[in-house]
Image (tube, rainbow, N blue to C red):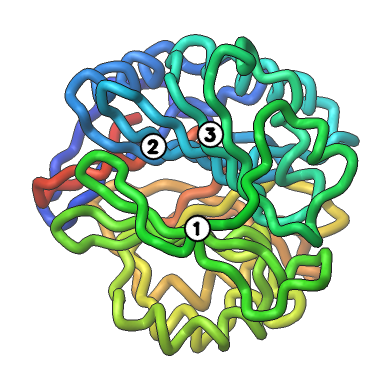
C-alpha cells in the first residue's frame, strides 16, 4: 500500500508511543517529512525507534538524544540477492550522515547476513566512537570487517536512552551460529511501557523467555520473530497470548520462497493488537494460497506495506499515526 498523504495526524490517547509510517520508499532516499520528524525529536530530546524498510532483512535504529547523541543500531541488513539491496544501503548511509550521531552502538543479533550486511562502509564512522556487540561464536570475517571496536563482553545491565532504557537479552545456549542464538533488545519508557525486538528467535527461545517477559505484558510493541515466520514454532500462540502486544512490527519483503510474514503468525497476534479508527492493509503468505491482501483496523505494520516505521518513546500517554 502506498500512502500519498504524509500530513494526517490522529491522536488516540491510549499509550506511551507514537508510530509514524512513511510512504513506501524503498526506491528512494529517506522521506523528507520522516527525516524532519526525526531531527525535531532529537532536538526535543525524545527517544525514538526507527524500523527501516530494508526489504527481506532487518534494521532497527534506537535514537537516544542527549548532548552526546547516541544511535543504537540493532541489526541492519538486507538479502543481497534482491534487486534493491544497493538502494537499502544508500538509504541507511544517507540517514546516518544526516542525523550525525556522536556515538554508535551496533548490536548484531546473529550471523545471518540479512541482519548485518548494511553495516559495512558507514559514512564518517572513523570519526564516531563505535562499539559493536556480538556473541563470539557469531563472529565471521564480514562482521569483523565492520568498522568499530568489537566489545570484549556484552553488557547485561540496563542502558539509558534519554527518557527510555534498553537491555540486551542473551540466549542461554551460546555456542551455535544460528537463529536460536539471536540476541534480543528490551526497550522501556520511564513510565513503564515496554517493547521487544526479537530478531530471528524460534519457538524454543520464546518458551524459555516467556516466564521472564510476560511480567511486562501487555507489550507496547513487538517485532515478530524471524520476519513473521512460523518455522520452528516461531510466533507461537502462547507467545502471542501471554505478551499481548498492542502493536506488531514485521520486517519483511514479499518473497515467494518464504512467504513472510505468514498469515498464521499474524493471526496469533490479532486478538491482542490495538484497534484504531484507521483501516489499513497488509499482505501475508500461505503455502496454500500464496500472498493475500487483508484490510484491518488492528495495529499490524509491515515494512513492505508501510515502509519505514517510527515509534516515539514519549513520557505522555498518547499515540498518533501519521501518514
Quickly name the residue at label 3: 307
Quickly name the residue at label 1: 155
From this viewpoint, is residue 184 visible?
yes
Task: Give the structural element (helix, strand or loop) at label 1.
Answer: loop
Q: CA distance from mark 2 to mark 1?
A: 26 Å
Task: Give the structural element (helix, strand or loop) at label 3.
Answer: loop
Foreground of the two, 8 or 66: 66
Determine whether label 2 and label 3 are within 8 Å by CB: no
Give left or right: position of 252 versus 245: right
Around disc 1, counting alpha carbons within 10 Å, would you say few (fewer than 14), some (14 to 19), or many (20 or more)?
few
Q: Position of residue 79 (x, y in %)?
A: 81, 40
Around disc 3, counting alpha carbons within 10 Å, would you say few (fewer than 14), some (14 to 19), or many (20 or more)?
many
Residue at 57% across, 29% down = 130
Task: Give the structural element (helix, strand or loop) at label 2.
Answer: strand
Q: Quadrant of the N terminus?
A: top right
Foreground of the two, 161 or 180: 161
Q: Which comes sooner in the sequence, label 2 or label 1?
A: 1
**In this rendering, which labeled residue sits more in front, label 2 or label 3?**
2
Quickly name the residue at label 2: 310
Q: Position of residue 12 (x, y in %)?
A: 14, 49
Foreground of the two, 56 or 65: 65
Above or below, comparing residue 121 to residue 284 in the picture? above
Residue at 26% across, 21% down = 67
Q: Quadrant of the C terminus?
A: top left
Q: Position of residue 136 (x, y in %)?
A: 76, 58
Q: CA distance from mark 1 to mark 3?
A: 32 Å
Say which quarter of the image contains residue 9. top left
Q: Residue furthest front?
A: 152
Residue at 59% across, 46% down = 107
Amino acid at each position: 500500500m502506498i500512502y500519498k498523504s504524509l500530513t494526517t495526524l490522529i491522536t488516540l490517547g491510549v499509550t506511551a508511543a507514537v508510530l509514524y509510517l512513511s510512504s513506501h520508499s524503498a526506491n528512494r532516499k529517506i522521506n523528507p517529512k520522516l527525516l524532519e520528524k526525526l531531527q525535531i525529536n532529537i532536538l526535543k530530546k525524545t527517544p525514538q525507534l526507527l524500523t527501516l524498510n530494508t526489504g527481506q532483512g532487518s534494521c532497527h535504529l534506537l535514537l537516544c538524544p542527549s548532548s552526546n547523541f547516541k544511535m543504537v543500531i540493532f541489526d541492519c541488513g538486507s538479502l543481497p540477492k534482491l534487486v534493491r539491496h544497493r538502494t537499502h544501503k544508500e538509504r541507511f548511509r544517507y540517514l546516518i550522515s544526516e542525523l550525525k550521531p556522536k556515538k554508535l552502538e551496533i548490536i548484531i543479533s546473529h550471523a545471518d547476513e540479512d541482519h548485518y550486511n548494511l553495516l559495512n562502509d558507514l559514512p564518517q564512522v572513523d570519526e564516531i566512537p563505535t562499539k559493536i556487540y556480538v556473541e563470539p561464536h557469531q563472529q565471521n570475517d564480514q562482521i569483523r570487517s565492520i568498522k568499530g571496536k568489537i566489545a570484549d563482553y556484552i553488557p547485561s545491565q540496563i542502558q539509558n536512552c534519554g527518557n527510555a532504557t534498553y537491555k540486551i537479552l542473551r540466549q542461554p545456549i551460546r555456542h551455535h551460529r544460528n537463529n536460536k542464538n539471536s540476541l534480543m533488545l528490551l526497550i522501556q519508557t520511564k513510565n513503564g511501557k515496554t517493547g521487544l525486538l526479537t530478531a530471528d528467535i524460534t519457538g524454543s527461545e520464546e518458551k524459555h523467555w516467556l516466564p521472564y517477559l510476560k511480567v511486562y505484558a501487555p507489550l507496547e510493541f513487538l517485532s515478530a520473530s524471524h520476519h513473521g515466520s512460523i518455522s520452528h514454532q516461531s510466533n507461537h500462540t502462547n507467545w502471542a497470548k501471554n505478551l499481548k502486544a498492542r502493536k506488531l512490527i514485521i520486517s519483511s519483503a514479499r518473497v515467494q520462497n518464504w512467504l513472510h510474514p505468514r498469515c498464521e503468525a499474524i493471526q496469533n497476534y490479532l486478538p491482542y493488537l490495538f484497534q484504531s479508527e484507521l483501516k489499513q492493509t497488509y499482505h501475508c503468505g500461505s503455502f496454500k494460497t500464496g500472498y493475500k491482501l487483508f484490510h484491518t483496523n488492528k495495529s499490524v505494520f509491515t515494512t513492505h506495506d508501510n515502509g519505514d516505521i517510527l515509534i516515539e518513546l514519549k513520557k505522555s500517554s498518547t499515540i498518533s499515526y501519521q501518514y
